[in-house]
Image: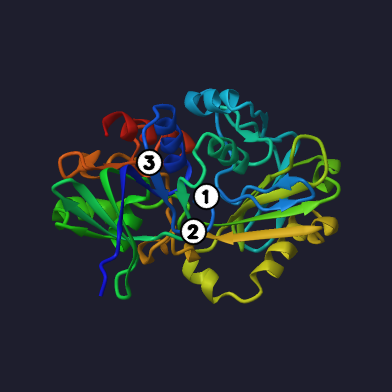
């Protein structure tokens, strides 16, 4: 039997989310050869923006904050993109445990939240323009990373079925959530127990969340003096916001399901319940969206693991796992927003972690 050929590259990036693709653009500017391996058939990772009549709904990260996220603001400007402020004018709505709905005073978040024209996928598309053609290999899930005398040997496929492809690299940028990497990739030699446990304990941001977007031809809630912001204690939705573009159709309501992943898996007719709840909170027109999108990240095997099913009750204080930014004497470098020294869990953290990985590799 002939041995499988190994493709050799200077730097191999694992993961084509924002951190991985941004790292690729930085390497491209340096004229350094690289390949990106992506398990999905698309780039973006948790950035997912289905299109309806020219509007792109953010079912992953929706906001950035220019006042505190300068890298995101600078990158958006450099790429020729633009953003707009999250709509927050008007009264809010609050739904109690018994389903009773009350109108409450609205408020403006500080610092102000911004959305991106074209959705966050516009950011990915612009970044992708700076990457050489065929540099990203889709449908390439990494199952093994082996330390070698020359760097690392990376296997693609499923461990039980044998590798589908192999790559040799001087350096590796691991742009995956640490928990996902620890749960799905075999490292040889074994990672230290301390590091492996630290990676598994690092919760993946949004991995336990489910998000929706309902689109309408008119902003009916605005016409009633509502901001589109609502919070519920009875569910299935827990948090709702105006998810529209800036002053043109379609208009949208978006937000998060407020019940755990395990309960979502057991609940029948969840979409119908969400739409019905929108009508109960805002009015009958909101119960009849022109389009509806839903994404349960807990069911995404290239995002979530079984450890991500319990709800994450607060934003973690992210940092490099076990304080390490690399392993195997600098052969493999951590990237991804969960490994950022600052702004972990945000898009800003994805950028800073990518910059660190490229700078140190």
Q: Secondary structure at mark 1?
A: loop
Please tell me which of labels 1 and 3 falls first in the chain.
3
Q: Which residue is mark 1?
A: 43
Q: CA distance from mark 2 to mark 1?
A: 7 Å
Residue 311, numbered label: none
- Can residue 301 be seen here? The reply is yes
Q: Residues within 10 Å of mark 3 (few under 14, many from 20)?
A: many
Q: Where residue 142 sits in the image (x, y, percent)?
A: 35, 59
- Residue 330: x, y in percent? 20, 39
Residue at horizontal 66 percent and vertical 28 percent from the top = 82
Q: Are marks 2 and 3 in contact (CB under 8 Å)?
A: no
- Residue 341 seen anywhere in this rendered image of the structure: no
* Dot 1 alpha-carbon crowd within 10 angstroms: few under 14, some 14 to 19, many 20 or more: many
- Left or right for 8, reference 53: left
Nearer-N-terminus badge (2/3): 3
Image: 249 above or below 145: above
Q: Quadrant of the C terminus?
A: top left
Residue 335 at x, y = what percent? 35, 41
Q: Secondary structure at mark 3?
A: strand
Q: Alpha-carbon neighbours of circle 2 within 10 Å: few (<14), some, or many (≥20)? A: some
Q: Nearer the viewer, residue 77 or 323?
A: 77
Locate residue 58 relative to residue 185 in the image: left or right. Answer: right
Closer to the eye: label 2 or 3: 3
User: What residue does disc 3 label?
Assistant: 34
Q: Which residue has dot 2 on it? A: 40
Residue 351 place in picture, x, y as percent: 43, 34
The answer to whether the residue labelled 2 contacts the one labelled 1, judged by CB atoms less than 8 Å apart, is yes
Residue appearing at x 45%, y 56% in the figure: 207
The span from disc 2 to disc 3 (Cα, nearest Å) is 18 Å
Q: Quadrant of residue 308?
A: bottom left
């Amino acid at each position: 039997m002939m041995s499988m050929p190994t493709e050799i590259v200077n730097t191999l990036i694992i993961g084509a989310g924002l951190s991985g693709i941004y790292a690729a653009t930085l390497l491209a500017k340096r004229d350094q050869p690289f390949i990106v391996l992506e398990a999905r058939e698309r780039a973006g990772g948790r950035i997912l923006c289905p299109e309806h009549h020219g509007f792109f709904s953010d079912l992953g990260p929706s906001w950035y904050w220019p006042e505190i996220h300068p890298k995101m603001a600078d990158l958006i400007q450099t790429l020729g993109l633009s953003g707009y402020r999250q709509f927050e004018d008007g009264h809010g709505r609050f739904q109690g445990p018994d389903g009773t709905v009350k109108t409450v005073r609205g408020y403006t978040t500080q610092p102000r939240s911004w959305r991106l024209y074209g959705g966050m996928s516009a950011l990915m598309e612009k970044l992708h323009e700076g990457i050489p053609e065929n540099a990203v290999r889709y449908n390439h899930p990494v199952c093994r990373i082996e330390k070698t005398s020359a760097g690392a040997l990376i296997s693609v496929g499923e461990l039980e079925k044998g590798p589908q492809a192999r790559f040799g690299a001087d350096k590796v940028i691991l742009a995956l959530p640490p928990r996902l990497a620890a749960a799905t990739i075999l490292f040889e030699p074994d990672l230290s127990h301390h590091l492996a446990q630290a990676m598994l304990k690092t919760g993946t941001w949004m991995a336990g969340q489910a998000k929706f977007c309902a689109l309408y031809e008119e902003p009916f809630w605005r016409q009633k003096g509502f901001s589109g912001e609502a919070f519920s204690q009875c569910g299935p939705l827990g948090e709702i916001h105006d998810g529209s573009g800036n002053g043109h159709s379609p208009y949208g309501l978006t937000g998060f399901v407020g019940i755990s992943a395990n309960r979502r898996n057991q609940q029948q007719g969840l979409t119908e319940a969400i739409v019905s709840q929108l009508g109960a909170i805002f009015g009958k027109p909101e119960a009849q969206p022109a389009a509806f999108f839903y994404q349960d990240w807990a069911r995404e095997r290239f995002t979530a693991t079984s450890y991500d099913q319990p709800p994450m009750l607060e934003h973690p204080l992210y940092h490099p796992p076990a304080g390490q930014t690399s392993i195997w004497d600098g052969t493999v470098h951590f990237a991804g927003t969960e490994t950022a020294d600052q702004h972990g869990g945000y898009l800003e953290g994805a950028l800073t972690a990518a910059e660190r990985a490229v700078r140190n590799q």
